Amino acid sequence: MKTLYIRVLRVLRAVLTRLGVVALLERRAPRSRTATWLLSLLAIHDVDALVRLDVAWWTFDSLDRVQAFLAVHRPGRAARVFEWGSGASTLWLAERAGEVHSVEHDAGWAQVLAPRLPGNVDLRVVAPVPSSSPRVSSAKPGHAGLDFSAYVSAIDDVEGELDLVVIDGRAREACLARALERLAPDGLVVFDNVDRRRYVEAIDAQVAASGGRLQVVVSRGLTPALPYPTRTALLRLSRAGSRTA
């Protein structure tokens, strides 16, 4: 079904290009969110087209919030970012942060993305390993019998505190617990696709464990490349001397 959907959209893009509609949307996109969203629908699974639109695959509202955070979070020092799951977000972040450390489980996708990355991005492939009893598993269909322990713990290979951590890959529940351990006092976590019950439960568990110090803002709305609204969560851990969300 997904393959058919992508084919239909590519045919539609070709038709709309010939009719001049795509050119019209491209002229409006820098000022119009609706035009940007419509173009992103036609650019699904086309990383170059999404990069030209300057979007990550989170809700537009969360994009605005993260951009504002990166612009002012620590005057005089560009942000240090870590993300599980690479893609258009990697390039979007690279334009706004000092350094981006991205971990990808899919070597084929990493090969596609790598030539497009600027010098402030470190992209690593950490593939899961087959296991009859995985210590860290992924609930995504097709990933049974795979251990994502090394993938999740790859964040520990980056020294120092992290200003922004993005969770948009595999084994997200385990990634969340590790992200909060590495977050700077005024840091931010982006947890995408929290429409899924298991992700909501993982966040709720961390809020309870934090004694209420973990502050969560859930953004629901239009998302680049998707024809339906989704949810992205932004999390901040309140600590002594830190700013609140």
Image (cartoon, rainbow, N blue to C red):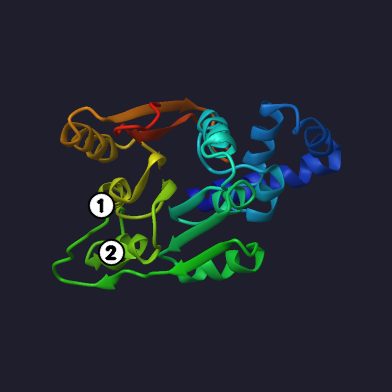
Residue at x-position 26% and y-position 36%: 203
**Which residue type carries mark 1?**
Ala
> Would residue 188 be visible to someone looking at this image?
yes
Residue in front for this viewpoint, 47 or 1: 47
Q: Which residue is mark 1?
A: 174
Judging from the image, what secondary structure is the residue with disc 2 in? loop
Is residue 192 something that shows in the picture? no
Q: Viewer-proximal residue, 193 or 242? A: 242
Give the label on residue 148, or none: 2
Number of numbered labels in the structure image: 2
Q: Residue at x 39, y 33 (%)?
A: 233
- Lateral position of residue 68 relative to residue 190, left or right: right
Tell me the kind of residue under disc 2.
Phe
Circle 2: is it few (<14), some (14-19), or many (20+) Cα within 10 Å?
many
Residue 31: which quarter of the image?
top right
SS of the residue under disc 1: helix
| Residue at the extreme bottom of the image, as rendered | 130
- Give the mark nearer the N terminus: 2 vs 1: 2
Residue 204 to residue 7: above or below: above
Seen in the image, is 82 located left or right of residue 31? left
Quadrant (top left/top right/bottom left/bottom right) for the C terminus: top left
